[in-house]
Image: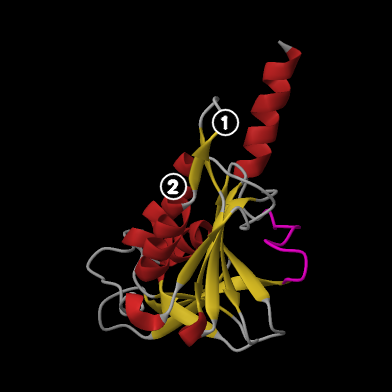
């Protein structure tokens, strides 16, 4: 009984808004908040918010409760001819449950606008999504700002996770990194402390 109570409160704490990530997807990464840039209503001004995609949506819905009604993503997925590659078993601090990675992907697939990581040191990473210790990260390889359609980043995370899915007899798990050298960024999926 005590273990169920502990598991409940650990899960509740992981879901609380405003919690900040304390671990990076790789040891040499610099942590930055994700930036979101876009319109919250058709014809409206471009706006900026920071946080995970879940936190950004909560902030926007305080201003516009029916967000994202009537809006579309603005940038296509990078071309597969751009020399991208997927490395498995390197994203995050280990493997994560793909069901929870998919929850983040679902958010990215319905939110218009662009998600990104601010300029900083090479290897600067922003947590795009995290729930139940399943994280999606966007990292700049050269320290320059990376800003891409949230929808396209969701597609990259989906490909990343499902290209690197494995099982341990207790369920499926994924951990991976999809690199886009022509665009100087990569997307990681895997276990993180959140």
Name the secondary structure under disc 1.
loop
Left or right side of 130 for 61: left
Q: Residue at left 60%, top 45%? A: 95
Marks 2/1: CA distance? 21 Å
Q: Residue at left 55%, top 25%? A: 170
Q: Residue at left 40%, top 56%? A: 158
Most foreground residue, 188 or 35:
188
Q: Is residue 144 magenta?
A: no
Residue 181 point in image, percent of width and height: 51, 82
Most foreground residue, 8 or 134:
134
Badge 2 or badge 1: first in the primary sequence? 2
Q: Residue at left 65%, top 55%? A: 92
Residue 52 point in image, percent of width and height: 55, 62
- Label drawn at residue 103: 2
Label total for image: 2
Residue at the extreme top: 1
Q: Crowding near pointer 2: few (<14 within 10 Å), some, many (20+)?
A: some
Q: How is the image coloured?
A: secondary structure
Residue 86 point in image, percent of width and height: 49, 64
Residue that label 1 marks: 168
Can see residue 58?
yes
Residue 108 point in image, percent of width and height: 40, 61
Q: Nearer the viewer, mark 2 or mark 1?
A: 1
Left or right side of 69 for 32: right
Can see residue 52?
no
Most foreground residue, 18 or 97:
97
Name the secondary structure under disc 2.
helix
> Which contiguous range is marked in magenta?
19-29
Above or below residue 132? Residue 189 is below
Above or below residue 42? Residue 87 is above
The quarter of the image holding the N terminus is top right
Task: Tell me whether the residue at label 2 lies in contact with that at label 1, contact meaning CB atoms closer than 8 angstroms.
Answer: no
């Amino acid at each position: 009984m005590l273990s169920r109570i502990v598991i409940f409160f650990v899960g509740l704490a992981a879901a609380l808004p405003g919690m900040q990530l304390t671990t990076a997807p790789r040891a040499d990464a610099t942590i930055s908040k994700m930036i979101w840039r876009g319109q919250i209503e058709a014809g409206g001004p471009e706006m900026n918010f920071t946080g995970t995609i879940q936190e950004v949506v909560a902030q926007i819905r305080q201003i516009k409760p029916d967000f994202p009604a009537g809006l579309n993503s603005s940038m296509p997925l990078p071309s597969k001819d751009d020399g991208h590659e997927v490395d498995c078993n390197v994203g995050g601090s280990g493997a994560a449950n793909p069901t929870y990675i998919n929850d983040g992907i679902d958010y990215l697939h319905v939110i218009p606008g662009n998600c990104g990581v601010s300029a900083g040191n090479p290897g600067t990473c922003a947590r795009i999504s995290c729930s139940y210790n399943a994280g999606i990260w966007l990292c700049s390889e050269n320290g320059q700002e990376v800003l891409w359609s949230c929808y396209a980043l969701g597609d990259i995370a989906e490909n990343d996770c499902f290209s690197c899915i494995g099982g341990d007899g207790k369920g499926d798990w994924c951990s991976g990194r999809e690199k886009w050298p022509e665009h100087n960024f990569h997307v990681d999926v895997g276990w993180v402390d959140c």
